[in-house]
Image: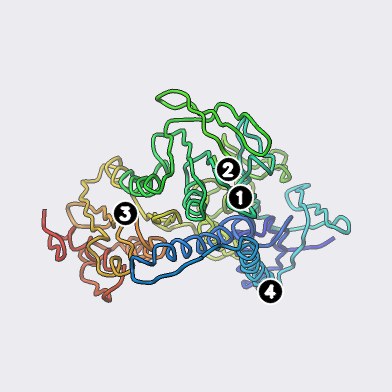
Amino acid sequence: MIEADVVIVGGGPGGYVCGIRAAQLGLKTVVVEADRLGGECLNYGCIPSKSLITVSKLLDKVKEAERYGLKVSGATVDFLQMQKWKSEVVSKLVSGVESLLRGYHATVIFGEATATSKGSLSVTTATGVEQISCKNLVIATGTRTSSLPGLDFDGDLIVSSKEGLELKAPPRRMLIVGGGAIGLEFASMFQKLGSQITVVEIMDQLLPGSDPDLVRVVQRKLEGRGGKVYLKSKVTRVNKKGSEADVEIETPEGKVIVPADKILVSVGRKPRIEKMNLQELGVRTDPRGYVITNEKMQTNVPGIYAIGDVRGPPLLAHKASREGVVAAECIAGLPSAADWKVIPDAVFCDPEVASAGMTEAKALEAGYHVKRSRFPFASLGRALSAGEPEGFVKVVSREEDGLVLGVQIVGPEASNLISEVALAIEMGATVDDIALTVHPHPTLPEAIMEAAESAAGHPIHQLKV
């Protein structure tokens, strides 16, 4: 019997971070992982997808280089080498995670864990069964991809994002079911790699829940490159014909048939909790199966915690990691809690979309008197000199005192720009605070300053309205 102060089931961005922090705090820590450390994000999502997106963006830049005076001919993508490079990136990071855990003296067990009681688990490993006794249990089992009736994954024609990242060549025609973050990242990536893209989304806009102003920029770019988007639509039938299929789509204008060589289904995720026996343990879940916790990551059962995607949306790696730190610190007796104001979000489509805090619609819904201001990247020297003029920064502020409520960005490096905004909101910054902060020139973050200057009533590089 292995005894521990804390056992974390799941070694993803939430679980392994929780394990590192718990071990740092002197707790006897065990991390149980059924597959590979790093979880879905590191192995099958965030990192491999961004690796491939980097290649697709580079290829796109090379193809349009002649307009900048750089003549390149014969540029092609070696998909096998690209996949090899992606795998090397992932393997290096996975090894790093394992080294950190072991370096802090956390025990790592690879196997399938089943909770047998509040303080004990059974772990089936490659060599047998391990029994673990623990004072505290942290559930960090994450989520798995959801499927749709009639669109069951077969790993060949109908694939999930995990399988989509392992393709050995770009499909000639890819149909993507689901226009959320994952769907749009795949759409942008494979479009640049040469695929004809069709996106089917049941809601009335891509990236449901995002500011429609931002989404329109992304959709316009996707369609401008020859992609097709069907909103308020759904797939009703897939007629397979060997290695391809005719896909029947029900749209507001009627039924259409779209041929496809690959159908990528990305319609959400569901919690992976089957082995945890939560009902027997008395742990409460919501109607969708997500584990309910308080701000300290504690469930209703003392000594049992939950972190990351298994707690529910937003399903983001950085949110899971921060929750892992909170859980570890609370177990160690520190006064920690989920007291952040915002969880920034980023989508690596083309152009990138990022957001922190409230959208204009959410702020109005919350009863604020809202002022909004925008600054286009087309007016920014760095964006023009980089050949990426699309998009804008939008600042949502409280009208009476300029308190920044939220910022949305669509455009180049939005994923990197949003962190400045998240810090500003956490610090309670006003638009004057951002406007008075000197930003280096020429850089992309100047767009945030310029939008703040506009909100403060004294725009410099655009006319006052």
Q: Position of residue 283 (x, y in %)?
A: 64, 42
- Secondary structure state at the residue bearing disc 3: strand
Which is nearer the N-term, disc 2 or disc 3?
A: 2
Q: Earlier in the sequence, mark 1 or mark 3?
A: 1
Q: Which residue is mark 3?
A: 406
Frontmost of labels 1 and 3 is: 1
- Observer-nearest residue: 123 or 416? 416
Q: Residue at position x 74%, y 55% from top?
A: 34
Q: Residues within 10 Å of mark 1 (few under 14, many from 20)?
A: many
Q: Residue at x 53, y 55 (%)?
A: 296
Which residue is the site of mark 2? 264
Task: Mark yes or no: residue 248 visible.
Answer: yes
Q: Are marks 2 and 1 in contact (CB under 8 Å)?
A: yes
Residue type for callout 4:
Ser
Q: Earlier in the sequence, mark 4 or mark 3?
A: 4
Q: Disc 2 residue type? A: Leu
Check disc 4 and report the residue beneath it: 99
Q: Earlier in the sequence, mark 2 or mark 4?
A: 4
The answer to whether residue 182 is above or below residue 66 is above
The secondary structure type at the circle numbered 1 is: helix
Q: Residue at x 30, y 40 (%)?
A: 365
Q: Nearer the viewer, mark 4 or mark 1?
A: 1
Whether tag 1 and tag 3 are in contact, CB under 8 A, the answer is: no
Q: CA distance from mark 1 to mark 3?
A: 34 Å
Is 284 in front, or is 227?
227
Q: Answer yes or no: do the residues labelled 2 and 4 have beta carbons within 8 Å? A: no
Q: Nearer the viewer, mark 2 or mark 3?
A: 2
In this view, 233 is above or below 263: above
Q: Amino acid at mark 1?
A: Gly
Q: Contact, CB < 8 Å: mark 4 with mark 3?
A: no
